[in-house]
Structure formats: structure tokens, C-alpha cells
Amino acid sequence: MADAEERDSRRLGHFRQILLWPLQLMPLSATSQIHRHWEWLEEDRADNPWREVDDEFTEDPTGFQQRHYSEFVTFLPHVQRFLYGEGRSRDRAPGESPIRVFRRHDVARVRCTYPDPRLAVAEFQIAHIDLYFFYDLDIAVLNVELHASDITLDCAQETLFRLGRAYPTYWEVNGAPGHCLTKTEWLAADGQLLATSDFELQDAFRSHVNRYRAPRVAAHWEFLLNPLVAHHSDATGPLRYRQLEYHRMPVMAYVAVDGDPRDLDPSDFVRLGLVTASGPPGRMPLSVPDFEQRYCYDRFWRTAASGPPGSRYMCCGEAFVLVGSARQRYFYEPGGSLLEEFRHQYFLLFLIPHVHKAALLMMADRLLESLKRLDIQQAGTVKRFKREIRQMREIFLRFTHRYWFHRVSDQVQARNLYQMAADFLATEELYREVRERIQDMSEYLESDSVRRQANTVVRLTVVTAFGLIGSTVTGYFGMNLLSVDELATPQKLLYFGCIVAGVTWLAFYTVMKSKGLSDFLDALSDERVTIREKASALLSVWRRQRDDG
């Protein structure tokens, strides 16, 4: 009987995993500030497997279910407008949400081959594969949700640890990819193989990094993102992306233990909460003495043996895990219970801070790219740099007012879980860092503009000062230095042209020498400077030209 209870506590009645992969989208046009990458996916073409997901807010109110309502009221009004758009009002039509979601339906299952021979091969059903776009943000988020029932806890831990890897970080001596599945295969509904991983191709991954200075994405992930293509590659396509973060994708997990989850060993919770590889109970994968205080949200977790176990929430920023009992209807019931909240409310609570982080990393990357293309010796690059920094200030301002939230809900649980994820991701610090970078560049541009204006004022002042001499002399003689009244018209025109040319040349020559003349005027006005030094300052106006030559 004890063996049966132990076996139940190590099996899961239901397991669900959600992968999020934020990516940076490259601009479609150098002259456009807002890029609508999703418009290409709206076109119905043979090489486009993506179709836009219908909005829950349809004309037929019967399609708006209770779960939609519960999801909506979880969030504060300004977050509701971000997630769902504007509603109808008396004087205007409803506004669209800045989020556009596209889904592909050709992938039905994923087959995982594990390096551990005890696990061998496991198949998971694909709930959906979505691609999220955000208006005015050049990022996309790939969302893959998969699930299975009646699997071992070890299988779930290994899947969480190994599946969401864009590329291997190393290879074992036997050629096996480090921390990755031995093989990942996307399958159609009829069992047809659609794509398979190629983690074992060490030379391909190494040569790609050597050539492009960027990691190569595994073949099965390239297939899933198609028609998006990696920016650092020879592939051609209208939509290009580059990676923003580590090769390990953020992950969510719903773990419904077949028995009592309180029977799990503390090491099992550490493996789930921090997403490490499976291992024997009783042996900690990491030394985390403050695990429960730092990573667990136990507001609804009951450690007493009597009564239901409740639910334990674990979050480390890159992972969000919900653990409970499959025997409790409030926790696991297909089509209802906490499972639906996990798939919708908690998914959005986890998505928002990762969108914040991805958007801020994207802006930081674009600032760096603008700075790398700047050459202060070339006026064209300086003008382009100023234009790009002004655009980044505008983008950052719109991001702040449209997407940036400190609080998303007044419900205690939702507010605390969101804050846990945001704190671990350090989005507040990243926001301040990007804002300071943009401000530093803006202040540099403003100071440069002030300096240029000051130089212009100095030159104009010098021209005015030296032009004052000629104006005074000619004014004294009443502009009657030459008697031209008796001359013929051609001679008058010749005199006029010569005077205009001479004055114009003198004005431009004074502007050319304005820097040296300005220094001479400074020396002339300084009573501490001797006559000899003042004369030397005057002569240096022309001596500098010879030195520069």
C-alpha cells in the first residue's frame, strides 16, 4: 500500500507546459518608425501557415464565456485597454487592442526523446502555437502550449528542463547536446513528421557562430517560426528576427499530482520551481536555503495533513510553476478550475513582464546600433544619429504610456504574483537604465546643438564687430566716396558689382577667420594682456592657417 501511495505521488494526473520566446523583429523600412510586421501574416499564401486568432469580444454575446469575464475583471482598467482594446462608447466605435495574435494549426503533437534511457520517448499534445505581435514594438513572442496526462514527475521535470532550448550550449563527449533533448519532433495530426531537431550537428552550430557572431537556431524552431527567418543567416524572407535573451526560453508549468503534492520531497519542488533536471528525491540539485521564502507563494498552500493540500505557486522570473492535486476539482477539472486560470489569467500575468523586458532590451539594442553607425567625422552619420535618437525618444515615450505598468491588478494574489515575476526579471532597473541611456544621448545632442548655435553666434558677432568699422567709415562720408552720377549705366553697374563682390568676399573671409578673430577680440579686451601679445594674437589669425596646412 505504501508503494502504491509513493507511486501516485510521483505521477501526474495532468501536466501542462507553456513556452514563451521573445524575439526582436528587424525594421521593415529604414524610413518608417512604426512597423506592422503582422500585416504580412494576414495575407493568405501557401508559405504562410499562420492565421489570426479571433477576438473573444464578438457581436454574439453568447460566445463570451465566464472564463473570459473572469480573465477580464482580473486586471485594472488601463491594463484592460492594453490587453483587450477600447470598448464602444456613445460617440465612437470600439478601439482595437495593440496586441495581434496569429496561430498555426498544422502541428498537433511533439515527440520528445530524452537522454535518460529510463524515460525513452514521450509524446505531448499541442494545445496551440501562437505568435504575438505588439503595435509600435518591434518584438514578437512565440507561445507554445503542450500537455499530457498520466506521466511521471521525472518526465515532466526533464521536459521542463530540456524542451525550451533554442540551441545547445555544449556537447558531451559522446556528441549528445548538453541540456537539450536528444531529439525533438513536430508531428501533424495524422502522425506525419513535420520537422526534427538537429542539435547533434556540432560543426553547423560552430561555423554559424564563427561566421555571423550569433548563435544558430535549431532546425525545429526555425520551422516553427517560418516565414520569420533569422537575421544573422543566409535565409531570405520579409520578416527577420534576432534573439534577445539567453537560449533558454521562459516557461510556465501546471503540475497536477495524482496523489497528495505534500508527499513530494523538498528537492522535487526545487527542481520544479527553478527548472532543473530530474533527480532522486532527497538530493537537492542546488543549495537554496531560502527557497520557500524567496520563490514560493504559499498563500493557498496547506502543510497540515488534514484537509486539501491547496496550491503552491513558484516563480523565479524565467519560470512560473503551479502545483496541486489532480484529485481536487477546484485545482484540476478539464474546462474549468485553476487550470483555466493558469492558461489565461496567469499566462497574461507572466507575459506582461516578459514583454516589458523584451521591449526594453530591443530599445537598448537599437540605441547601440545607432551609436555604432555614428562617425563624428561624417556629417551624414551625425544627422542620421540625431534622427534615430529622436525616434527612440518618441518610441520610449509611447511605450511608457501604452505598455509600462507598475501594477496590473488590485486582486492580492494577481498583484503579488506579477510583482514576483517583475522583481526577478529586474524590469524596473532595466527601465531606468534604458531611460538614462536615452536621456544621456538626448542631452549630448542638445548640448551639441547649443555648442553649434553658440559658435554661430560668435561668428556673427565677429562679422558684426568688424563690419562695424566699414559701416562707420562709409556712414561718415555719407556714402559719397565716388561721384558716379555722371557715369554711364554700364559703368555704374560695374562699380556696383565690384563693391558687392568685395563686400561679400570680405564678409565670407571674416566668417572663415571668425574663430581666430574671436580669440583676438578676447585678447584685445583683456587688460592684463600686453600690446605685444595682442599683436601676436592678431597675427595668429593668419599663422594658424599656415599651421593647419
Image (cartoon, helix red, strand yellow):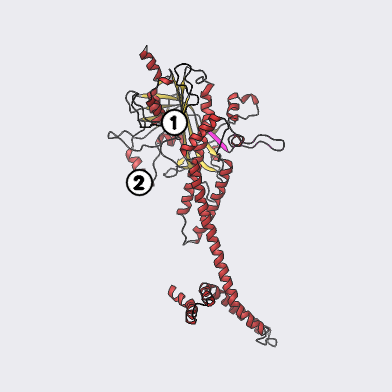
Q: Residue furthest left?
A: 173
Asked whether residue 523 appears in the rendered view, the answer is: yes
Query: Relative to 241, does residue 191 appear above or below in the rendering?
Result: above
Image spot of residue 153 (x, y percent): 39, 23
Q: Main secondary structure of the magenta part?
A: loop
Label 2 – label 1 distance at C-alpha: 43 Å
Q: Residue furthest right?
A: 90
Q: For numbered disc 1, what is the local secondary structure?
A: helix
Position of the N terminus, as image quadrant, is top left
Position of the C terminus, as image quadrant, is bottom left
Image spot of residue 69 (x, y percent): 60, 27
Report the magenta residues as a range.
Answer: 82-103
Which label was assigned to residue 293?
A: 1
Counting the numbered discs, the total is 2
Quadrant of residue 410 within the rendered picture: top right
Q: Residues within 10 Å of mark 2 (few under 14, many from 20)?
A: few
Image spot of residue 192 (x, y percent): 43, 26
Q: For numbered disc 2, what is the local secondary structure?
A: helix
Task: Specify the amino acid type for callout 2.
Answer: Asn
Task: Specify the amino acid type for callout 1.
Answer: Gln
The answer to whether residue 99 is magenta is yes
Q: Residues within 10 Å of mark 1 (few under 14, many from 20)?
A: few
- Given residues 152 and 465, the one toward you in this image is 465
Which label was assigned to residue 210?
A: 2
